[in-house]
Amino acid sequence: MRLTILGGVDKDGCADHIETLHIDSGEIVGIVGPTGSGKSTLISDLEQFAQRDTESRRQVLIDGQPPDAEVRADPRRKPVAQLSQNMHFLADMTVSDFLAMHAKSRGREENLIAKVIDLANTLTGEPIHPEHHLTALSGGQSRALMTADIAVISDSPIVLIDEIENAGIKKQEALKLLAGEGKIVVVVTHDPVLALMTSRRVVMKKGNMVRVIQTSEEEQKVCNSLSRVDRWLINLREAIRRGETVSAAEAAL
Amino acid sequence: MKLVVIAGTPGSGKTSVLMHAARCLEGSGSRPAVVKVDCLWTEDDKRIGRLGIPVHVALSRDMCPDHFSIYNVDEMLEWAKKQDADVLLNETAGLCLRCAPYPDHCLAVCVIDVTTGPNTPLKVGPLLTTADVVVTTKGDLVSQAEREVFRERVLEANPHCRIVEANGLTGKGGSDLAEIIRALPPAAENMMLRHNPPLAVCTLCSGELRVSKRYHRGVLRHMDGFMEYSGE
């Protein structure tokens, strides 16, 4: 599958500097830029397969063609799964009722519920129970459940992720889980590890797709060093969370 | 003259959806006019007026706003004709969940807010179940999974409707709705309501203030479900 974004206009009505962007199956692409630079707008253009009918006037094509209206609207046919910034559930339902209803809306088997919950529980330290109420889940639990739901129930060839780092879950594991095999992954991120895990990143400025940066070999090396720092930080954080003390030896990188 | 009736719960974003659709209609050469019905107060004429299309505000005051809309349909269509419009967008006050102010030969649009939760489509009643198009709003405030569950619930309540996901802030959905409106045939003479109105005319409607059974007349339902006619 090939996803194509045809440039539109920014907040001042000027044309995107990037006129055409192709993303092929198996690729992870980042979107970076300061707050208000239009990262979420770009993700939302992808999510709804914008046809020059959104604020940005961008157009999104699948394999060179605009998807028909039914594909855009029907979640059973829509090839997109999105992990959004909205961390909390508003639906007053139990976890299992909600997952059953979501599986139904996607035309999937309802017996996937246990699989989603098991997977979610590998991402969060606080176990989720099928009878828990969605609205009572913590931020980390909600995010873990949304991530597992996308990996198992939505299981789409295109995955969009909006700022996973604020999640209170294991972010690299979550990204690997979501990326799966041969998917197109687009991830909005401020996190240097995640940004450098991508093969390319789109730079946004005032609503404009200003440039695309190819991740260099040097940056890949930086990414590897950063991953070690990240794991070290996670271990320290977990130790402190467990109520343990931290020694100078452990604190050395 | 085409007739579009836009109903939905208060605060769901009816006016924003209507404005985005009107803008798209105008952009493609249609001539929309808007009648906004409200109960007591509205400033939406100023808001909608910024689009530069004919707007008329009608306050139902102490008459039931849905009854008011239905009663005045001919007058509204007549007014729109005088404005040289070819499509009348009638936004209703959106209060009662027992009525549905949709005539048979109109495009019935129900606007509903996703953040009210996935049980809402089951509670809204004929407003949703007899609509041709259900426009869901504020979907950007919830997760994709929750949007999809909400959509499933809408389809459970009204399996034949078309669903348009809209965003009142960005205008998403406006062009989809405009496209559906363009394909609509004109309104007919002697239209009928799609859904039966509530039981008889009630004593509250005629101004009875006193509480409890002995003051009320009409076809009435008791707590245990028993229905009786009380009157002469």
Image: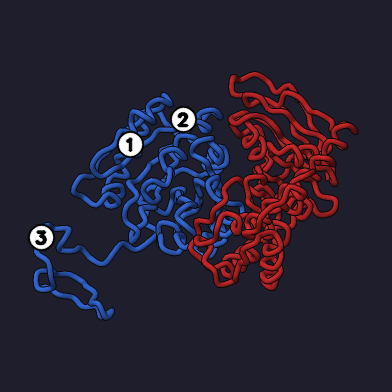
Chain colours: A red, B blue
The CA span between labels 1 and 3 is: 37 Å
Q: Quadrant of the C terminus of chain B?
A: bottom left
What's the chain of the residue with tag 3?
B
Answer above or below: position of A45 versus B7. above
Q: Nearer the viewer, residue A72 or A26?
A: A26
Task: Kindly identify which residue carries mark 2.
Answer: B31
The first of marks 2 and 3 along the sequence is 2
- Labels 2 & 1 near each other (Cβ < 8 A): no
Q: Secondary structure at mark 3?
A: loop
Q: Nearer the viewer, residue A83 or B11?
A: A83
Q: Nearer the viewer, residue A157 or B57?
A: A157
- Camera-nearest label, 1 or 3: 3
What's the chain of the residue with tag 2?
B
What's the chain of the residue with tag 1?
B
Q: Residue at x 31, y 43 (%)?
A: B74
Q: Secondary structure at mark 2?
A: loop
The CA span between labels 2 and 3 is: 45 Å
Residue A90 appears in the rendering: yes
Q: Quadrant of the N terminus of chain B?
A: top left
- Residue B209 numbered mark, or none: 3
Residue A78 appears in the rendering: no
Task: Kindly identify which residue carries mark 1.
Answer: B78
Answer above or below: position of A175 versus A223. below
